[in-house]
Each structure stands twice: as structure tokens, then as C-alpha cells.
Amino acid sequence: MNKFTKQCVAAVASLAMAGTLCVAGAVVAGSSAWAVDGTECTANKAPWDTTQTANCVGSITIKKYEDKGNGDTSVPLPGAKFKVQRVTKLSTSDTTNTDLKDYKNWEALATKVKSLNDNPNQAGMEFDASATQEAVTGSDGSKKFSNLPIGLYKVEETQPAPGHSNDVTPFYMTIPEITHEANKQVTYDYNVTAKPKNQSLAGKITKTLVRGENETAFVGNGDTMTYKISAAVTSNTATERKNWTKDDLTGYTVFDQAPAGVFNDYTAAVVKSATVVYKENGTTDKSVPLKDDKGTNNISVATEDVKGKDNNTTVATRIKVSFNETGLTSIATAAKADANAKVEVEFAFTIKDPTQVTEKSFTNKSGFIPGQGKNKPTPTPEVPGDGGSTVTSNYGYLQVNKYDGTFKSTDANTQTSKPKLAGAKFKLFAKKTDADACAANTSATECQNASKVGELTTVDGGKFQTPVKVVVDDSTHPFYIVETEAPANYERDHQAHKAVVLATSTEQNPTSVDIANVPTKDNGSWFHLPKTGAAGVVIFALAGVCLVCFGIFVFMRNRKKDEEQQAA
């Protein structure tokens, strides 16, 4: 938004006649008639008018909204804190008189508009303590600061609304606000309004599970779950984004808030990589490593416990990734080039034995700490509540039904038949390609990508001793089960069986996969061949010998006749 509203432009253009100043940062300025405490200034009288009420007062009303673009003011923001201060001195070396009851001081102040807009935090600026107020916006997003004398005011957001960024640059307003529309009288409004906006933090950070070949890469105990956090680059600095440097991002941090008790390690070792990604010149994709496996390391990692409501129990560990000066410089460069620049950090966690966990599910959250601008308060960690910043996983149970292929899968063991097979060995896989390779060839090399859950063996009844407890990240999460060794007298099953484990499955009612085995010849239950005796074999052998001898005799006789005919 332009720093000057239409009213300001018109008023400055007519300064020789009426005089004005309007210095407003990223706000929408307007006017509103409000009753005020104390002696109210007479409306539509100039502040330098000798008939204006002596020592009169006006007001500044803040109306805070979520930044939804296009002038949308549909979402008011309660809980934002603002401070208004009447300026008595512009800077250490500036001697401009700020008494705006004198017209010539308006002219002098008009020459300072650009510098105040460009640098709202002037060094050595002084304020009137008796005309300084600080308060938070109410449920309707507004707050009125009353009993403010004529003068120049600095307005600053000192605390953003919950769940929103502190991206409002300090701005200046005058009491009164002077406007002069074409063909109309100059107006003087002593009860002025500003409508600053904050961006919602919703969607500023997303968290996903890293997948390969459109599949997850974990099953359960000992496997690795890798999360990618993608965070927007934010800061509470007063500096415009196009001018950001590393100093505007001091303390910028991205963190994983990993739930307690579900992983084996919560140290800095889980941070796998960090990258800043953006578009250069709006078209070219750029990616700058901040930490990788090639030696780049411009990050530092710290951890802290997150306590529960009782403030005693640790419910999560916050693994915070911050950046050194080189890293912050790369991030600032990206942020200046692209408003949608993102810092991406990958965290790799080893799954703790699920049988040691009593919960049915766990949620891994994420968050960030905006950068801190010069002379700005230290930002607080933000953990957005929108679903995109969290990943919830469930525990499920997997079982097999191993049976003799000459029976039905539903047949049960009886005293005379044993359709259920013990002694079959299996491995679990997260990816189909890995499972297919192992199913085709069960060598150690081809099966090396099996889950660290380990080898599983069926017992009497054709099932595992207990169902396997696995981690399911969504309702379509597939696992693959491969038989690596068949029971004696059976051919190994050569397929990778897909298993979609339900999040609602339990140890008593697991998701089950039917897998049959084909009996081998020595099993005794394969096709029965007719019996043959030795006598028959001898007869056929003798007959064969006779035929050979007869053939030789005929050949020799014919040859002799041919020779006799040739001799004659």
C-alpha cells in the first residue's frame, strides 16, 4: 500500500492554503467522529485558528484486521497491542518545532515526511510522556486512544494479534488530519482512525512426511520417519522487505515439536538438512543449501522441553534450528527476491518400539520464531494451529493367515488335516520396488531394504505369535509382506503382498493378510501318479533291442545286394 493516502496527497498539494501531514506506514487511514473525554477540539477549525478551543484534545482509533487483501476488513483481530506517542523532537540533530498549533511548523514538518516514511525509527526521537498510551485491541479489533493533544504521533504495534505476524511498520499520524478534496472545503478531523493489518500465520509453515515413489519409507520399530518443514521467512522488523539484510532476521528459527516417547532420539543428530528455496526474478528456481551432507553447515541446533498443562510432564521436545550470519544472509537474499521464499528443514527420527507405547496415535507439530528487527521485542515461538503444520500418525496391527494352498484360507486345523502352516518366515517392506526385488530373489542383497522390524515367523495356527504393531500415517498407507522361507515340503510364495493396515485395527482385531503355500512333491498331498512294475519296463527294453537289431540286419542285406548288382 502507498504510504500516502489520497487524502494526504490532496492535502499536501494544498499545503500553501491549509497545510497538512499524513505519514502512514502499511495502514489504511480514515476519519471517524467519536465523543472524547476532556475538552474536544472544535471540528473543522484549523489547529492554528485563534478561535480554536485552547488545549483541546482529539483521539486516535486503531481498527485491526487480518490482511486478506483487496481492502477486505472482514476479520477483526483482537489482542494486538499498540503504543501511541506524541513526538516532541524528531531526532538528535533535528530542531524542527513539532508544535502543530502553529501553521509554519506544519510547513517545516512537511519536509520531513519522506525521511520519516523511509526510516520511522529515527535515532534520538523524543516523546511526550503525558501523551503516551499503550493498550490492546478488543474483541472487535479496535482500540481508541483518547485525550490526545494536537501534534504528531508515532504509532507502533508492540505485540501482534495471536497467531499473526508482527509485520506492521511503525507509522505516523497527526491530530488533526487535514483533507482537501477537489471543489470542496478543507476539513480538519481531530478524531482519526488507522486500519493496520497483520498477516495470518496460518499456512506460513507446512509439515509433510518425506515419501519415495509415492510411498512412505517406514513400517515400525527401528525404521526412520523423515519430516520436511517448509517455513515462510518472517520478521517483525520495521525495514521494508526489499531492503532486508541478515540483521532483520536475527533469531529467525524453524523448529520441530516432536512428541515425547515415540522416537529414540531427540538430539541435534535428527536434523538431516536445511535449504532456502525461492524464485529469482520471478521465474528461476533457486535452492541454497544451509546444511547438507557435502560439508555445508550454517545452522545451529538447540533443544528444549515442552511441558504439559500441569507444567511438570514433558509432552514434546522442541528441536530448534537457527542460522549463522552466512545462513541469514542467504535467507535475506531469498526473502528480498521472493515474498514466497521458504526455508526447508528435514528431520529424521528413528521409531521407538511401538509395543512400548500405550497411545493409539501421535502428532508431530512444527513452528518458527520470526526474525527480530532492530529495537523490536523478542518474538515468541509460533506454533500455528492449522492442520498443514502438523502430521498425525496412528498405530495399527498386522497379522498373516498362512495356509496350505490345497485348502481354503478359512479352513481350520483339525485332527486329520493341517491347513494352517507354522515355520514360514517373512520380512516387511515400506516400498513396493524393494518388496518385489526380495520376492524374486531372497538373497541378502535383494532384501537389504526390509524394515528393521526384523524377520517374523508363523507358529501353529499359521499366524505370528503376536500381531506386528506398525505406524500408519494415513488411511491409504501400504505395507508389503514377503515370504523369505517356506515351511518344509512347501514352495516359497514368490509375491509381494500389499497390506493396508487400518488405523482402527487392534491387537485383538488386526488387519490380516492371507498367504498360501503350494505343496511340493514330497509333501504327500500333491498329485498322485499311477504305480508301475519292473516287468513292464524289461519287456519294453527287450523290444527296443530287437527292433535295433532287425534294423541293422535289413540295412546290411540291402547293402550286399547293391554291391552284387554293381559287380555284375
Image (cartoon, grey):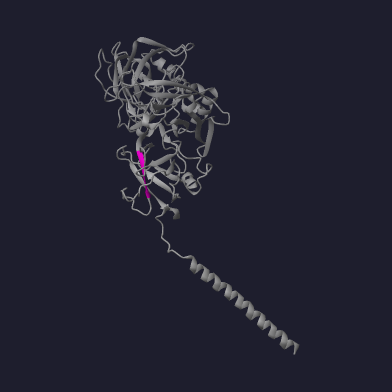
Numbered range of the magenta stretch: 397-403
Residue 4 lies in what quarter of the image?
top left
Furthest-front residue in view?
A: 535
Measured as percent of width and height from the top left, residue 66 is found at 34, 29
Q: Left or right: where does residue 544 sit relative to residue 109?
A: right
Measured as percent of width and height from the top left, residue 165 is found at 39, 26
Q: Is residue 193 above or below residue 436?
A: above
Q: Left or right: where does residue 368 sit relative to residue 324?
A: left
Q: Residue at x 34, y 24 (%)?
A: 162
Q: Residue at x 50, y 27 (%)?
A: 332
Of residues 12 and 18, which is closer to you in this image?
12
Q: Left or right: where does residue 397 sit relative to residue 563?
A: left
Camera sees residue 4: no
State which quarter of the image contains the C terminus. Answer: bottom right
Camera sees residue 255: yes
Residue 386 lies in what quarter of the image?
top left
Does the magenta-highlighted stretch encompass residue 507? no
Q: Is residue 176 above or below residue 466?
A: above
- Magenta-drawn stretch, dominant element (helix, strand or loop): strand
Furthest-right residue in view?
A: 567
Measured as percent of width and height from the top left, residue 31 is found at 31, 25
Residue 198 lies in what quarter of the image?
top left
Of residues 339 and 274, which is closer to you in this image?
274
Of residues 85 and 295, which is closer to you in this image?
295
State which quarter of the image contains the N terminus. Answer: top left
Measured as percent of width and height from the top left, residue 525 is found at 39, 55
Q: Is residue 88 above or below residue 424?
A: above
